[in-house]
Image (cartoon, helix red, strand yellow):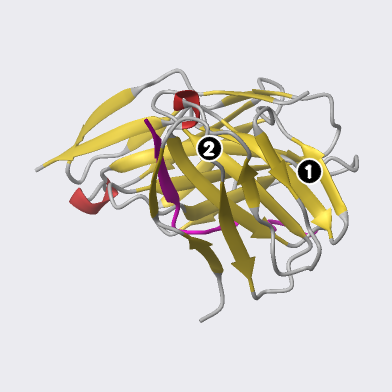
Amino acid sequence: AQKITQTQPGMFVQEKEAVTLDCTYDTSDPSYGLFWYKQPSSGEMIFLIYQGSYDQQNATEGRYSLNFQKARKSANLVISASQLGDSAMYFCAMRGETSNDYKLSFGAGTTVTVRA
Amino acid sequence: NAGVTQTPKFQVLKTGQSMTLQCAQDMNHEYMSWYRQDPGMGLRLIHYSVGAGITDQGEVPNGYNVSRSTTEDFPLRLLSAAPSQTSVYFCASSYLGLAGGNDLTFGAGSRLTVL
C-alpha cells in the first residue's frame, strides 16, 4: 500500500521569496513516480512536476523544483520567487510503476498563501 | 477541445435518491478514475479502470458503482445517496505505461450536496 504524508496544512510566504512544501511517502514498490499538483481557488487540478524514483537528477519545471531524497522517502516541492498567483492548495501524489497497480494516491494537501 | 468532461457541475440530492456522474475523455487514455475531495483529506480514490470492461475499487468504494463499457466513458453511480457523500468529485484519466510522467488529466469537478 502507498501512503503520502503532507504535514503542513497551511503556509504563508512573502512575494518573491522561496517556499518549500514537504512530502514524505511510503511504498513497497521498487519503482514509482512522484507528482505535484496545484489547485487554485477556482478548483481545477493542475499538474506541476514529476519525479521518477530512478531519475538521477531532481526534476525542475520553471520556478518549480522537486527536492527528491530517496533514502529519506521525501519529495519536497520548492517554489522559487513566489508570485501572488501561486496562492493555492498543493498536493503531492505517487503511483507505483512496476506492479499492475496504477492507482495514483494523494496527500492531504498544503495551502499556500503568498503575501504582497 | 481534448480533455476530460464531467457532468453535471453541481447537483443537489435528497437522501436515498440515485444519480450518475458522467465522465468522458477524448484522449484515448486507458486509465480512468474517480476521486472525492473533502476538506483536510486530500483526494481519495473511489474506483478506477485500466481499460474497457476492467474496473477496480479504490480507497473509498462503498456506496458507489462504476462501469467501463467504452474507452471514452467512465460513469460513477450513487445508488442511494447519503449525506456522507456530500463532496466534490473529480474524474481523471491518463495513459498507462512506465514512461515518465503519465500524469492525470482532471475534469473540472462536480459538487454534490446530499440533504
- In the image, which disc is placed on residue A54? 1
- Above or below residue A73? Residue B55 is below
Q: Which residue is mark 2?
A: B36
First to last magenta residue range: B99-115
Residue B65 percent location from the top left of the image: 71, 41
- Above or below residue A87? Residue B27 is below
Residue type at tag 1:
Tyr
Residue B108 belongs to magenta span: yes
User: For residue B40, what is the image quadrant?
Assistant: top left
Residue type at tag 2:
Arg
Residue count near mark 2 (Cα–Cα under 10 Å), binned few <14, some 14–19, many ≥20: many
Q: Chain of mark 2?
A: B
Q: Chain of mark 1?
A: A
Disc 2, SS: strand
The residue sitting at 20% across, 46% down in the picture is A16
**Residue B45 falls left or right of residue B37:** right
**Residue A100 falls left or right of residue A78:** right
Which quarter of the rendered picture does the C terminus of chain A lie within?
top left
Disc 1, SS: loop
Foreground residue among A22 and A81: A22
Foreground residue among B63 and A36: B63
The residues bearing labels 1 and 2 have C-alpha atoms spaced at a distance of 30 Å
Foreground residue among A41 and A30: A41
Which quarter of the rendered picture does the N terminus of chain A lie within?
top right
